[in-house]
Amino acid sequence: MDNNFISPKLKKKFYTRDVLTVARELPGKILVKRSDKNILAGIIVEVEAYDGSFDQAAHTYRGKTKRNEIMFEEGGYFYVYFTYGAHFCCNVVTGVKNYGTAVLIRAVEPIEGIEIMGKNRFGKGLLNEKEKLNLTSGPGKICQAFGINKKHYGLDLSGDEIYLLNRRKISDDKIIVAKRIGIKKSIDLPWRFYIKDNPYVSRK
DNA sequence: ATCAAGATTACCT
DNA sequence: GGTAATCTTGATA
């Protein structure tokens, strides 16, 4: 096991800042999911910011509902939603209470528990190169590989089940800033951040 | 009660 | 490149 795992867990303070600040710093951090049976982990390589105060693509744009209520809490909670009849997507809530902001985790590079992720995604632990690249290169894929679902809605990221670990910040010249993917409103906001040339990024 | 849309993915040509 | 699959949610009546 490499020294990624001695990195400290990101604390409340990290998440309670402005959503774009947090989104910019998330690539390079490590997503961890722990259970009594195993540890799954991956380096975040792609994210998108959502801000309900004026961003029409955000789930919080039209106010609080049962589905999005956790996004109106202060930063540091896990927002999981279900979409297209098939996929869960996971987010990190940011900002202060009542802001309605979060960062969607769109892709990670798997580093721990790859065999279990393979079983969750493809029903087998031994993967070829193509399958490995397809493990967690999209928001729905991450949740399937990590076994993230509705049960994890609203988890506190300072707890022990799901959390992020710090790592050195990725330098600006290695972060690509782009328009977000898969939305039909507020499409021009440059709120997607991903690591340059990383093969696990969902799309160029 | 009904309905349309969706922060996607896998599979097709 | 394009599109079917699939069902929860939120909006409207």
Image: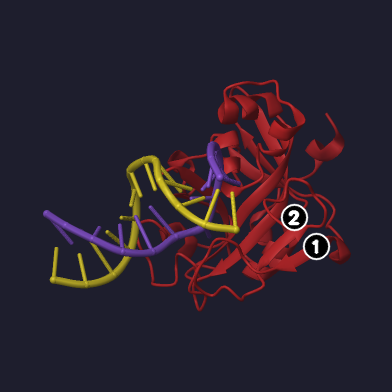
Chain colours: A red, B purple, C yellow
Disc 1 vs disc 2: Cβ atoms closer than 8 Å?
Answer: yes
The residue lying at 82 percent from left, 57 percent from top is A196
Q: Earlier in the sequence, mark 1 or mark 2?
A: 2
Q: Residues within 10 Å of mark 1 (few under 14, many from 20)?
A: many
Please, is residue A80 above or below residue A172 in the view?
A: above
In-front residue for pair A12/A106: A106
Q: Position of residue A1 (x, y in %)?
A: 83, 28
- Pointer 2 local density, CA inside 10 Å: few below 14, some 14–19, many at least 20: many
On screen, A134 above or below A69? above
Q: Position of residue A2 (x, y in %)?
A: 85, 33
Q: Chain of mark 2?
A: A
- Amino acid type of the residue that numbered disc 2 sits on in the rendered structure: Pro
**Residue identifier under label 1:** A175
Q: Quadrant of the C terminus of chain A?
A: bottom right
Which residue position is annotated with label 2?
A: A27
Q: Give the secondary structure at mark 1.
A: strand
Distance between the Cα atoms at labels 1 and 2? 8 Å
**Res. A157 in view:** no
Residue that lies at the very extreme toward the bottom in this rendered image: A54
- What is the three-letter code of the residue carrying label 1? Ile
How many numbered callouts?
2
Residue at the spot 61% in from the left edge and 76% down from the top edge = A188
Which is nearer the eye, A63 or A195?
Answer: A195
Chain for disc number 1: A
Are labels 1 and 2 on one chain?
yes
- In the image, taking residue A67 as reference, residue A55 lies left or right, namely right
Indicate the quadrant where residue A126 lies: top right
Q: Viewer-proximal residue, A39 or A107? A: A107
Question: Compared with residue A128, is residue A183 higher up or lower down, i.e. above or below?
Answer: below
